[in-house]
Amino acid sequence: MPKQNFNQQIENNFKSHAPKEAQPEMYEAIREKAKELAYLIDYLSPNSREKSVAMTNLETAVFWANASIARN
């Protein structure tokens, strides 16, 4: 494997980020709003592949939104 140069972005993206200050409340606010939308999707959408994809993408959005708080 070739010698790797230090890359701050890679270092930041692949380390554990302990919550700071108000971050836990921010994570929770995002999760609560997403859960509200998840229930709306579940109620209005017929069971289907499309509904499953919508739910998966909502979970993905929550993950990345919380990752943006943790990493930055």
Image (cartoon, rainbow, N blue to C red):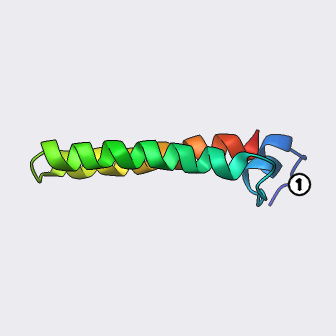
Q: Would you call the spot at circle 1 few (<14 residues within 10 Å), some (14-19), or many (20 or more)? A: few
Residue visible at 81% across and 51% down? 20
Name the amino acid type tagged 1: Lys
Q: Assign the C terminus to one quadrant of the image.
A: top right
Residue visible at 28% across and 44% down? 54
* Left or right: where 26 falls relative to 72: left
Q: Nearer the viewer, residue 58 or 22?
A: 22
Q: Nearer the viewer, residue 8 or 50?
A: 50
Residue visible at 76% across and 55% down? 19
Residue 62 is situated, as x and y percent measured from the top left of the image, at 50, 46
Residue visible at 65% across and 48% down? 25
Q: Assign the N terminus to one quadrant of the image.
A: bottom right
Residue 69 is situated, as x and y percent measured from the top left of the image, at 69, 42
Figure check: 50 above or below 19: above
- Location of residue 64 by image quarter: top right
Residue 49 is situated, as x and y percent measured from the top left of the image, at 17, 51
Residue 41 is situated, as x and y percent measured from the top left of the image, at 23, 44
* Left or right: where 4 falls relative to 61: right
Q: Pick out the residue farthest to the left.
A: 46
Total marks in image: 1
Q: Nearer the viewer, residue 61 or 1?
A: 61
Q: Which residue is mark 1?
A: 3
Q: Circle 1 sits in a helix, a strand or a loop, which is it?
A: loop
